[in-house]
Each structure stands twice: as structure tokens, then as C-alpha cells.
Image: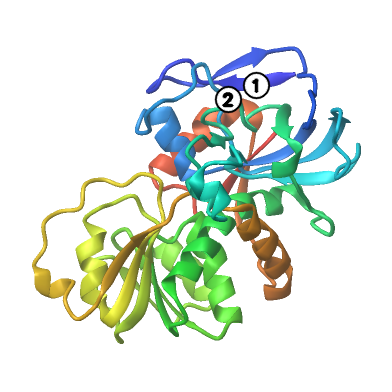
Amino acid sequence: MKAMVLRAPGGRLELERRAVPVAGAGEVVVRVEACGVCRTDLHVVDGDLPDLKRPIVPGHEVVGVVETVGDGVDTLRAGQRVGLPWLGGTCGHCPYCAAGRENLCDAPEFLGYTRDGGYATHVLARAEFAFPLTGFDDPVATAPLLCAGLIGWRSLKMAGEGSAIGLYGFGAAAHIIAQVCRWQGRSVHAFTRGDDLEAQELARSLGASWTGSSEARPPVELDAAIIFAPVGALVPLALRAVRKGGRVVCAGIHMSDVPAFPYRLLWEERSILSVANLTRRDAIEFLEIAPRAGVKTHTTAYPLERANEALDDLRDGRVHGAAVLVP
């Protein structure tokens, strides 16, 4: 098999040839068809996240076909297309798992961070964290749903039932969840880095009722805002844009420091929430909703060997929609 391997944070990925992994009890080996390139992968590669397993194969938006099945696996079969998300395993017995909040597990496993991920031709996964993708026939189009879509969905649920939603950072997650918002009958207000005309045009094509820079005031007060960009300075801007009782949801696993801001921006029962990881229930819900909502992803495909180029393009804002690696 081939894999793009990170040996040290801040380094470049290196192409490596390895033996195909062997499925143990409760595991499957998946032949990768496509793997999305997520902003979290940038945080892994750039060393923003602690306790990184090294060396590591990044990637956690995996679409592939089950190649071999380990002992005790009766929910999946060889030849079946599955998706593998960020959450790669949980302990199952900590207080959070026991309370149905496995996204906060005390001893979790994360694909592409604590166990090797999908920047490869094959990946070893726990079968109970692999999701059948019946009816998802295009691996490249499907890959971004496995994180950008799932985290967007969890963020939207935390944002509440309001009708006017602001999306800060119109990238992979926002371009997916904007379509869900429109399907639900909500209005979308898309905020971009500076006057990113391509991102704003994409937002309008997906039904956004307003687009503008992150510093701009939307034409109406927002019921909620979701911040996908890893920029702490957006928090006070989003608080300024939401109505009384509104919510600001921080959707990233990493964000730069939030600057000091006057209490009046938070007053009147506005709130700030953060999203951590996802649950298997989130995946089941969203993979059912995405086809019903008619979600169409906008992707740029890169060969596996050009993973560094894809990461550079994402880091520098040259990707509109989602980047996807294809072995």
C-alpha cells in the first residue's frame, strides 16, 4: 500500500510504501477510494494539536470499500462501500460514553490523529465506527460529508431552530450546511475572508440571501452564527451580529485566541458554544438527511501523491468548496 506520512509536526508529508494492514477482531481493512482534505488536517500537520501520534497518516473524511473483515464483525461485508469519520473509537465506559455523549469520551481515538487515516490506499478501522454508504455512488463527492458535513450538522443542531443563520468562513463545511439550511427553510448569511468573490459567488449559487466580509454587518439580526474559520477574532464580530438570546457556535477543533470584548456584546442572554467531535448518531442522522436535502458538494480532486499541494492550497485560501485526495 501507499501512504502519505507525517513524521514531525510542521514537516511535509512523505510518500511511503507499507504492507497492507491486517484486520484484527472487530476491525475492517478499507481500500480508500477518496479522502477529503479537512482544515483539521492542517492543524495536525502544522502542530496546532497536542499529543499527536507520530509518525501519522492524516485524513478522516474517508470513502472506501471494505476489503477484509476481522473476527466478530457481522455488520459489514467485503465489497461494501463505507465512510470513516474523525471519531475512530471510544472507550464505551467513561461517564460521557455512559451518558450518550461519546464525542466527549475520556479515551477516544481519532482517525488521522491518534490512528492512521485515509491519506493512503488502505486504512484499518474499527468496524463499529464505519458507516455504510448505500446510495452514495460518487466517492469524491461523498468524502467531504464525512467531516465537513457531520461537524456542520452537529453545529447547526447546536445553533437551535432560528431562521436567520450566519456562516463565518465559507469553505467545505459551510457550503454543505448552507444547503441543509435552505432545505429547512432558513435564510443563510455567508461571511468570507475579506472580499473573497469566488466564495461569495459560491454562497449565492447555493441560496445565500446575503454575502459579505466577516467585518460587515448583515442586513438583519441573526438568530445564530456558526464560525467555521479558526479565527478567534470572529467571536465578538458574530456576537455583534446576533439578536438578543442568539447563539454563536464555534465549530473548529482549534481556534486562535479570542480577543477581549465588551460585556455588552454577550449581554441579553447571547451565548457562545463550542462543538467537540461528533457522535455516531450525528453520522446516522446526517447521512440520511444529505440525500433528502439534495446536498451537492463542490470539490477539487488531487492525486494522493499531491497531498502537500492540496494542504497548501487549503491553507492559502485557494480551495473553494472541498479538496479531495484520490489514490
- Residue under circle 1? 3
Do residues under tags 1 and 2 come within 8 Å of each other at their CB atoms? yes
* Percent position of residue 303, x then y: 66, 33
Residue 225, disc: none
Residue 297 higher or lower than 15, as above or below: below
The answer to whether one can see residue 60 in this image is no
- The quarter of the picture where the C terminus appears is top right
In the displayed structure image, the side of residue 7 where residue 16 appears, left or right: right
The kind of residue on which mark 1 rests is Ala
Q: Regarding mark 2 in the picture, which secondary structure is present there?
A: loop
Within 10 Å of disc 2 (Cα), the crowding (few <14, some 14-19, many 20+) is: many
* Percent position of residue 116, x then y: 61, 26
Instruction: Report which quarter residue 150 is drawn in.
Output: bottom right
Q: Residue at x 29, y 81 (%)?
A: 245
Instruction: Report which quarter residue 269 is drawn in.
Output: bottom left
Residue 57, disc: 2
* Percent position of residue 292, x then y: 73, 74
Q: Residue at x 25, y 75 (%)?
A: 270
* Percent position of residue 276, x then y: 44, 51
How many callouts does the rendering have?
2
Within 10 Å of disc 1 (Cα), the crowding (few <14, some 14-19, many 20+) is: many
Q: Regarding mark 1 in the picture, which secondary structure is present there?
A: strand
Instruction: Report which quarter residue 70 is drawn in.
Output: top right
- The quarter of the picture where the N terminus appears is top right
Residue 260 higher or lower than 62, as above or below: below
